[in-house]
Image (tube, rainbow, N blue to C red):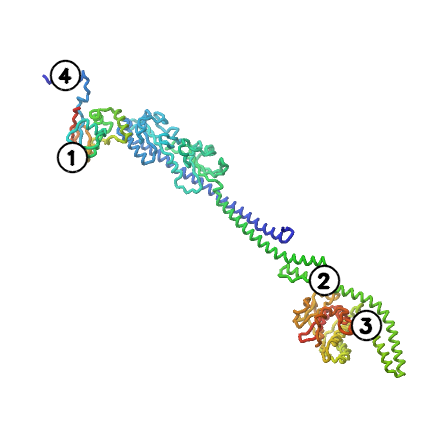
Amino acid sequence: MISLNSIRGKLLLYAAVILILPTLIYGLLVYRSARDVLEPTIREQLADEALRVESALREFLIGHAQHVRGWAHIDIMREIVVHDVDKTISQFLEAARADYGYLDLMVFDGKGLCRASSNPAQLGKTFVEIAPHSVSSSGDEGRIAYSPDHAAFYMKFVAPVPDPDRDGYYLGTLIALLDRSALEDVVNAGRKRGLMEVLLLDGEGRILAGESPPPGSQELPRRAGYGGRSRHISGAAPVVYNRMDSDGREFIVGEVALRENSALPKLDWHVLAMMPRDTALAPVVGVRNRVFIFGSFVTLIGLVLAWIISSNISKPIKDLTEITTRIADKGALETIPDPHSADEVGQLTLSFQKMVDKLSAAQEELIQSAKLAFLGEMAAGIAHEIRTPLGIIKNSAQLIERRLEPLDDAEGAEFARFIYEETDRLNGFVTDVLNFSRPAPPQKSEADVAAIATRALHVLKAEAAKKEVTLHNRIEGETPLLMCDSGQIYQVFLNIVMNAIQACEPGGNVEVSATLLNGPGERSGTRGSSGHDGEGGHARHIAGNEAAGGSGGNGAAGDSALSGPVLEISICDDGPGISEELRDTLFTPFSSKREGGIGLGLAIVQRIVTAHGGEIEAGNRPEGGARFRVRLPLSG
Amino acid sequence: MLRAWLTRGMIFAVLVLGVPAWAFEKPDFVVIVHPSNPVSAMSRLDLERIYRKDIKFWPDGEHVIPINAPSSSKVRASFNKTVLRSSIDALVTFWNRKYFGGETPPLVLRSSDAILSYVAQRPNAIGYVPAGYSIEGTRVVPIRFDD
């Protein structure tokens, strides 16, 4: 279950919203736009089709009405008088029937008896639907009726047969019965309508054409719901409207009334071109559905991508969270692995790394401070208690030596000298401890570093000579004046050089040099600490192996944070170098492994350098031996 | 004298016995055929049967094409009376029945000239024109009214 409070949940939610919402909106817009374009076009097509069929139908009906009227006027109709004894009319009617597709053509005399017909069976009979002496269009002309004789539906055309010899008199009536299927042919002619349905309805809603009556039926089918509507349509202009069918299906209907014409009786007929609305809009719905399907597909792909991306983003954050939680819970500052990318999360990881490093350093310093505080307190107490007896012991030893001198007891005098010399050493130790635990703030003044170095080397010359070590002072020419406590800096030289002498084998060399650097960028191959913020902060000691070009260091290396002109003092020896195990505790108090050393020399050096806002770095030279670098800002 | 008596006797007989009028009426039309037609004479009954389409072939096997004058003409009325011996109504009834059976009445041509011209061109045609009409290009067939 993905929580919406997680990055993954949010990303997935955003991706879903960003993908689904436009798809939905786009699909609906496409649907609405296409529908708005298509529906009027379909309505127009329906109206056009209704009008076209109406025109064709009208021409067809007028054509037939004119035929029948024309035939009623031809000369042979005179034969009605002699009851078509020679069958001249009948033969003509038969030919006309065959040519024009009538069901039957008949001529009735004034008594309503059939005197000529294309169908001999009709001769001599009456036609019940024709009133005697009916000579003009009768009311039933616009009706499609069923003929049991023909077993078919027909439409009737009636024309009076005038008497050519007597104006205003009529010989009879010509009746033409047209099969309803002829109407069907007209309505269906030129049909390229696809799903469009065209119906011809009469005023009572009966379907005259467009849908055939079931076989054997003597009733025309009706289209429920359309007859009544037809009554409201008049005039030549087509009307388009939507109508619910009886089964609840919505149709778009183009309807036009059959226009009146003098050749035709008044017919309340209507042509309807109709199409189910859902069918008409099916292409649009299809497009909409395709958009939705495509959108769903894109959404799915988007969600999968969002899932993958969110995993990539959230996993390192989760890992980091786990580590920080562990650190918070257990208090152990464990190492944070390097980030896999340089993006914001990578930056965050790096920041965490730095933070943990700093915390580690701060923790170390805290421990050291605690040690020192304890040491300080202890030292202050011990110093007072030890110095007084030491003074008495030293004085007593000197008195003993003086008393032994006249006795020429050389051996006794030597023992006495041992006592007070060792007492001096103990006194020095007590002073060291006191100095370390209660460091005096540097009293800065401009000082010449070359002079300080020379003085220190001079003092150590005897010690060096004893160990057969040669001291080389490479600080030549003028060095710039340094704002410092010259006594403390002298102490720095003393302690480091003394350390170097101690480390060297007989015949070894110790070299002191200084370089002026105008900025941190000038140093190449140096390894400095970061995070130093000048006076009041702490100088970071760095112990690394320069032979490895910096890459083999202890991993906490970085560029120096010092800014402005810096004096770099370098003290090198050709001894065995700094061993791996010593490297980490080099500047830790009381950590000396050297015989006779108490492990405060380098700790004091570091403290002094720090108090001057500088840094100290210890490492091994590529050519062998150790190298200490002390960097001090010129401005102090 | 005897002849005079005979005539008087016949008139008397007609008046008294009611002899049909057509028995004494001289036809005022002549029946014509193509000059090549081998028939030299025919009985009234044969002629009637031709015009009622009961006889359809000449003795040589050719189709007979009877031609009628228009139904409203005098010569047609005379022909109906003397040859077919039927009223119009009877003929209508007859031909309605025949027409129902698929038989159509003889061809009608609108004028005697048309009838003459048609018969002159068709060896198997037969028609009639008013007596005294020029029958150029055709031949008169005498009709025996002996029944």
CA gap, disc 2 to disc 3? 33 Å
Residue A619, image quadrant: bottom right
Tell me the element at label 1.
Answer: loop
Which residue type does callout 4 highlight?
Gly
Letter of the chain that mark 3 sits on in the rendering: A
CA gap, disc 4 to disc 1? 44 Å
Q: Residues within 10 Å of mark 3 (few under 14, many from 20)?
A: some
Tell me the element at label 4.
Answer: helix
Letter of the chain that mark 4 sits on in the rendering: B
Tell me the element at label 3.
Answer: helix
Q: Position of residue A178 (x, y in %)?
A: 36, 33
Mark 4 and mark 1 lie on one chain; the one further toward the N terminus is 4
CA gap, disc 3 to disc 1? 180 Å
CA gap, disc 4 to disc 3? 208 Å
**What residue do we see at 12% from left, 17% from top?**
B6
In screen coordinates, is A271 left or right of A161? right
Which residue type does callout 1 highlight?
Ser
> Viewer-nearest of labels 2 and 4?
2
Q: Nearer the viewer, residue A126 or A589?
A: A589
Question: Which residue is denoted by mark 4 in the rendering?
Answer: B9
Q: Are marks 2 and 1 on the same chain?
A: no
Q: Are marks 2 and 4 on the same chain?
A: no
Q: Position of residue A557 (x, y in %)?
A: 68, 67
Residue A359 numbered tag: 2
CA gap, disc 2 to disc 1? 149 Å
Residue A90, image quadrant: top left
Letter of the chain that mark 1 sits on in the rendering: B
Question: Which residue is denoted by mark 1 in the rendering?
Answer: B36
Question: Which residue is denoted by mark 3 in the rendering?
Answer: A429
